[in-house]
Image: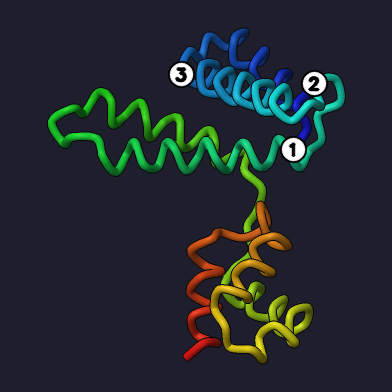
Amino acid sequence: MELEVLRKDMVAAMKARDKARKESISSLISAVKKAAIDEGCRDDIPCALVDRVILKEMKTVKEQIDTCPASRTDLLEEYQARYKVFEEYAPRLMSAEEVKACLERDFAEVLATKNKGQIMKAVMAALKGKADGKVINQVVAEYCK
């Protein structure tokens, strides 16, 4: 995802007077800028960084939805609306079958050890931002049985 796409969509949301969407996109942009400054690539922000930040923000909002008290319907609706906006920009993650195929193709020698710690260390570095950690953990656990 390009940062410029987010900026253009934020402007479109402002013109449409869609406050919730504008605020959601604005929070994504500020999180991307902060991460870029932290990593020292302030002027030239790579797409991989933007995707990683979007996934992190989605995870944060998902946790907020899960921990929000049921009596606070106003907050819950706000978090769900934000999550829907983030979903539009999130990169497509690999399914369990795709992760399994990737492991068999690229990590056959590590899988042979049946050492979950070693496998996870190698796989997570390669698939970070491409697949959900929980999905990877489940697939690796199947191989280690």
The residue to which callout 1 is attached is: 1
The residue to which callout 3 is attached is: 20
The residue to which callout 2 is attached is: 42
* The quadrant where residue 47 appears: top right
Q: Secondary structure at mark 1?
A: loop
Q: Position of residue 120 (x, y in %)?
A: 59, 70
Q: Amino acid at mark 3?
A: Ala
Mark 1 is surrounded, within 10 Å at the Cα level, by few (under 14), some (14 to 19) or many (20 or more) other residues, namely some
Front residue of this view, candidates 102 and 124: 124
Quarter of the figure that contains the N terminus: top right
Q: Nearer the viewer, mark 2 or mark 3?
A: 2
Q: Nearer the viewer, mark 2 or mark 1?
A: 2
* The quadrant where residue 78 appears: top left
Q: Position of residue 98 (x, y in %)?
A: 66, 73
Q: Position of residue 13 (x, y in %)?
A: 59, 16
Q: Secondary structure at mark 3?
A: helix
Q: Residue at x 81, y 26 (%)?
A: 41
Decide: is 17 above or below 89.
Answer: above
Decide: is 81 above or below 11.
Answer: below
Q: CA distance from mark 1 to mark 3?
A: 21 Å
Q: CA distance from mark 2 to mark 3?
A: 27 Å
Side of 90 relative to 134 (left or right): right
Q: CA distance from mark 2 to mark 1?
A: 16 Å
Q: How is the image coloured?
A: rainbow
Q: Position of residue 44 (x, y in %)?
A: 86, 26
* The quadrant where residue 26 appears: top right
Q: Give the mark nearest the N terminus, 1 or 3.
A: 1
Q: Give the mark nearest the N terminus, 2 or 1.
A: 1
Q: Residue at x 48, y 63 (%)?
A: 134
Side of 50 relative to 17 (left or right): right
Q: Secondary structure at mark 2?
A: loop
Side of 89 relative to 142 (left or right): right
